[in-house]
Image (spheres, coloured by chain):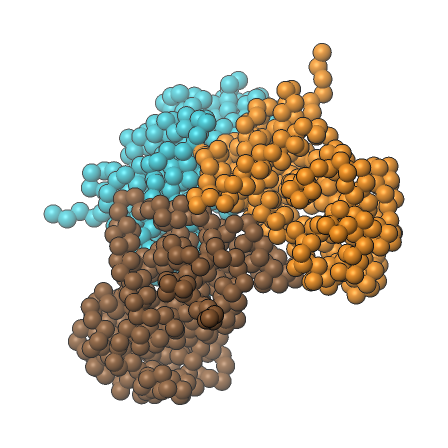
Chain colours: A orange, B cyan, C brown
């Protein structure tokens, strides 16, 4: 009997691509977080390299530009001793009218071992994973509004680092949730890891009502939304939303949904404040909070390198 | 007695630059193909690196943008353990009014070991090879309409891989031959390797009549041109030609010179179909042919990495 | 008792950042030049790598574009076996409105070990050095009109290589001194190393009078300025100055201040001619001089790699 193949796992249940947190069992998530822990010490060492991906070719395929995210993957891959090739896709074959799948087939024929893909269209990394050669592994570095699984995983690493146990937590995600692949990945991860109280906080135009079906509490009142929260995840407000009809102004948004010390006082006394970066000071978060004692925004960045090293080394070690 | 120096060979007849296939003896071509064979197995290994160029600095100097070709050289150099520096020439000194030779003199003074050069002007790599320091090696990665020798060599590798022996073959090159440095390099290589029947197939505007002087049969009828061919090399039709007076339309071109299953049936039953990529599906080649059983387009890409590793390692090992 | 921290030296007087030559003791400069000497032989070796920075992550942060200077640092870092990450800052977070210090904090959190910074604003590398994590080292690769210390050091290396002793020299710096961070760094270095006769030569609009307070002789007459000089440092005339009111025309400038064989005859018979590059032939320097026997412009480039290797390896070995 033939079963339909899982898009991310092989027949032994091992991770071969990382496309989305949705659909991954808790054990797989926990294995990634545990592995990331071992890499954190690598990053503190005098010589920060391990030879796990030596001789492997990792291609950064950024169809949508993001220097920051590309850099984190480049560092992670180089610390694993991989050869990294950055492709500026906009300039390359894409502009010569070559199809996505022809580009992928060509790069696979060059004996690529891994594609790190960012794309403005949701689902593009799935398409690539379905069509690439069996020895090639795909990591989704953000696709449309759909998923940003390594960001979700580094957020989970951060929460576990500071809070130890997921089973008693209240986590508030605040801001532009409807456009956020980070929010979506976080919600799937928090749910899988057993967080009992997840809240989506923001104006009606930016928080989709159907989140309730995912077991998320929707709050349009910021103070209610972060009350007694253990973890507050602030989302970046994209500048381009500001000019549209969806929002009054950055100043108005900050007044209502910006995280200030004042509002933060409503959360648990030991609450942590997270943000995927880059932050807009004075738009979604006050400088005093971003730089304050509750902020774990910079540890998130540090953990992000270790989590990406973990993901790459795990999938490279599993066969399709 | 002083003899005029060969532009590509040292006094022992060894390759020190790869500028063009024209003028290279058969033994040199065969040595490159044989060496490429040994590197193919490197690319299949778990760890794909060999230390042949360790500590060498390879500069990719792409005065004309080509992400795909640059990537193949970058991969090849990294698998040989070289340090690779990509120079975006358009942004650099060239825009500050520095001459080509001053740029080259400066990079040579940085102890560059190899320049991989693509340039829109025919002959630019020769100029560089003539003027650079004796320890520096030059690889032509495509100059104007003149030559693209590594493409020619990977095409020869592909033909030899599938057909074993050059001495009995009929090879048809189809499409925009007049603008194609690939066609020119292929014709020189096929001639040197002893292919008895080389055909140039395309409309009068795109196939120069003087090819006959090179021993090539010129055919303006596609069916006649590919009849009983062992090898069909389809060329990319540059989009920019389409808008000019040289061609009626992409649809018209496909009807007359596009390779379809129908026309392919006229070739030998075991004919192979090649293309330098990126392909224009439905312009010069039907998707059914590009993805069909006769197509060796993706193996060409794989062989291309091995051939570039071979060229780089051979010239780096020979002294001027 | 707390003393105000030195911006570049730790409490043992060791170099931890290279921000400016101003304020560095002679012993530190001499140590860098001596160390560069040992790296020159590395660059001549068959395998040009030393493992001094293995596993270290060096970030090239070029807020102002300069392919040439970035390339020299990239080569130097790779020859020290570092992982190099080039950030195209214009495209990245800067364009998303992130502040310089937030960008730096984020990259530090990725366990960066060194930032090589070029910035159009004078002082930017100081700001970064003040705010980055203690384990991070900063090299100024040119900030505004302020300083370009590695260029200053490679110029000193060049002078010492050809002239051995600084204590008897006459050095003329010629051209657009007012806009030149190279001139400023050279003057500080020459003064610290004990050169008794430093001259600034150029038109009144381009040579600031307050140089006299730094012990520099200001000459508006070129022939007087280079008379009996041992060393002539020609500066690049930026094209953008030409169109302004500051200068008549390139032709006029060349006639008065361009270095020709004719004028060069006024200097010492064994004078050396230097230039930071890229040169404008026929604007500030005649081709015959640039390519002539007195020119040491290309050795400067070679020494520049060794000097940058020296700076990076020295600061990486010292703790804050």
Give B142 or A305, whichever is nearer the viewer.
A305
Name the outermost residue toward the top: A1
Q: Is residue A182 left or right of residue C75?
A: right
Left or right of A240 in this view: A45 = left
- Is residue A250 something that shows in the picture? yes
Could you say where residue C215 lies in the image, as x and y percent from the top left? 32, 84
Front residue (pair C19, B87): C19
State the residue at coordinates (20%, 71%): C165
Query: In this view, which residue lies farthest toward the front?
Result: C1
The answer to whether C61 is drawn above or below residue C270 in the figure is: above
Considering every residue shown, the one lying at the far left of the view is: B1
Residue A168 falls left or right of residue B73: right
At x 25% / y 69%, what residue is drawn? Answer: C159
**In the rendering, at what x and y percent does residue C252 appear?**
38, 83
Residue drawn at the location 73% of the way across and 37% of the way down:
A166
Vertically, is C77 above or below B278? below
At a point 35% along the width and 45% down the height, the residue shown is: C51
Rendered location of residue B153, percent (x, y) = 40, 34
Please tell me which residue lies in front, C114 or B305. C114
- Quadrant of the snapshot with the N terminus of chain A: top right
Comparing B233 with C111, the one in front is C111
In the rendered image, residue B22, in percent from the top left (x then y), is placed at 34, 40
Which of the 4 image quarters holds residue A152? top right
Quarter of the view holding residue A97? top right
Q: Could you tell me if residue A146 is visible in this image?
A: no
């Amino acid at each position: 009997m033939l079963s339909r193949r899982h898009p991310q796992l092989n027949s032994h249940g091992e991770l071969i691509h990382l496309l989305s947190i949705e659909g991954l069992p808790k054990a797989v998530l926990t294995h990634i977080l545990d592995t990331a822990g071992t890499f954190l010490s690598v990053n503190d060492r005098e010589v920060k390299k391990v030879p796990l991906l030596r001789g492997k070719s990792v291609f950064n395929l950024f169809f949508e530009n993001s220097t920051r995210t590309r850099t984190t993957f480049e560092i992670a891959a180089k610390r694993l001793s991989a050869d990294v090739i950055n492709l500026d896709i906009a300039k390359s074959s894409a502009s010569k009218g070559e199809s996505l799948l022809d580009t992928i087939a060509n790069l696979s024929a060059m004996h690529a071992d891994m594609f790190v893909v960012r794309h403005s269209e949701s689902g593009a990394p799935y398409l690539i994973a379905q069509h690439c050669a069996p020895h090639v592994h795909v990591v989704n570095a953000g696709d449309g509004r759909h998923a940003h699984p390594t960001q979700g995983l580094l957020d989970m690493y951060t929460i576990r680092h500071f809070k130890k146990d997921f089973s008693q937590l209240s986590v508030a995600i605040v801001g532009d949730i409807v456009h956020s692949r980070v929010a979506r990945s976080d919600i799937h991860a928090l749910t899988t890891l057993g967080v009992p109280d997840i809240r989506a906080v923001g104006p009606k135009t930016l928080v989709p009502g159907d989140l309730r079906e995912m077991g998320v509490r929707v709050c349009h009142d910021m103070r209610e939304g972060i009350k007694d929260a253990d973890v507050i995840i602030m989302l970046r407000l994209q500048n381009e939303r500001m000019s549209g009809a969806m929002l009054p102004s950055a100043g108005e948004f900050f007044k209502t949904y910006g995280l200030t010390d004042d509002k933060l006082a409503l959360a648990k006394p030991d609450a942590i404040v997270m943000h995927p970066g880059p932050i807009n000071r004075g738009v979604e978060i006050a400088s005093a909070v971003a730089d304050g004692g509750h902020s774990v925004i910079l540890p998130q960045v540090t953990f992000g390198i270790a989590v990406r090293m973990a993901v790459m080394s795990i999938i490279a070690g599993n066969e399709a």
